[in-house]
Amino acid sequence: MSRLFQTKHVSGLLITLVLVLGVAVVSLVELAADEYVLETLIVSLCMLLGARCVNDETMPWGPSLEGAGPDPSARDLSSDREERRPSPRASARLHSKLQLFANQGNLPEAKRCFERIQAEAKPTVRTFNIILSACIKCSGCVEAEQWFERMEEAQVVPNQASYSILVSGWARAGAPGLAWRWLEKMQESGSEPTAGCFLSLLVAECKKGQLHQAEAILEDLTRQFPNARLQATTVLLDACAKHGDLEGAERLMQSIASEASVVSFGAMLDACAKAKDPQRALRWHETMLARGLRPNNTTCTALAVALARAGDFAQALGALEAMEDFGLQGD
């Protein structure tokens, strides 16, 4: 009876010890994923127990512990650490930090985070793209181009997003010529330009007053991306209004009349106001109402301005008073 009790007692202790060791090993493995602590622990245990780590079969991550001189059959621990890559979890955490710094516009911290990633693993195209976006946001396109060159030197192949960042960056910087250059590089690389690339170029050309060039971009954009047609046409229509091209604005409006939004009608009415053409303004306003679209402050104000500039102040005042019927308030 006493022996049976002792046997059960010893078995219980062994089970408890195994469970404790299991929890400890799991914790150490989780910690080792980031800091390589497990390697150091195992090597230390081997030293305490007098074990020999001679080759890859007994200890693939460690050198020989016997003898002062180098062992040709053993790999150097420091070089092996350089070949090792961080765990997916650690890599994801570093990239999350990099993205956070980029979004905050903290370029110095983003660069430091990049260097840490580079020290532990080869940066990917995603890593470089985050830095490219941060440069565009903080320091400008010139530094972004330098990082693009660094990406190529690191033998990381740029992707569609890499080129799109430079195209859109130069376009927003008011340099459509340089944006076109990157668009051509993008096509030469085999990457297809996105709708965003064409739209950013369209906006840049419109701001420069290059309406003919913008119209050519619009044709390419709508041919390749039909879903972007309404948005792109409205952008060019608004540019025509600002530059006093009433005929061009009306031609564009007619091309999207069946799908035009209240924003499109607002741009068209603004073009009529700038051209001091109240009759066209009234006609397009009636077309908008017939389409079942609800007027907004922009459309009502543009109509009132068109009438006032033509000297019809009574009707202009009536247009402003009609805003209350639609629940609108004048600016």
Image (cartoon, rainbow, N blue to C red):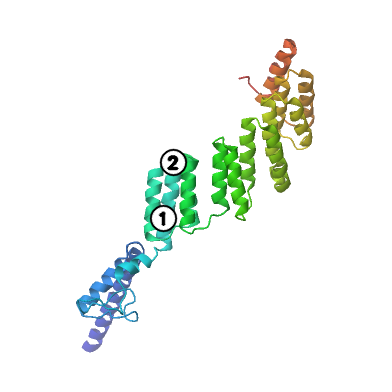
* Amino acid beneath label 1: Arg
Image coordinates of residue 187 in percent, x first then y, are 63, 51
Q: Would you call the spot at circle 1 few (<14 residues within 10 Å), some (14-19), or many (20 or more)?
A: few
Image coordinates of residue 127 in percent, x first then y, are 46, 54
| Quadrant placement of the N terminus | bottom left
Question: Reading the chain from its start, which is encountered first: label 1 or label 2?
Answer: 1
Question: Residue 285 or 80: which is nearer the viewer?
Answer: 80
* Amino acid beneath label 2: Gly
Choose top left, top right, bottom left or bottom right for residue 296: top right
Relative to 126, does residue 63 appear above or below in the rendering?
below
Relative to 49, does residue 274 appear above or below in the rendering?
above
Side of 32 where 184 appears, left or right? right
Side of 100 where 246 appears, left or right? right
Tell me the tag on residue 105. Answer: 2
Q: Secondary structure at mark 2?
A: loop
Side of 164 where 232 appears, left or right? right
Image coordinates of residue 189 in percent, x first then y, are 60, 55
Question: Residue 32 or 143: which is nearer the viewer?
Answer: 143
Tell me the tag on residue 93. Answer: 1
Image coordinates of residue 262 in percent, x first then y, are 70, 31
Question: Residue 146 or 292: which is nearer the viewer?
Answer: 146
| Quadrant placement of the C terminus | top right
Q: Is residue 200 visible?
A: yes
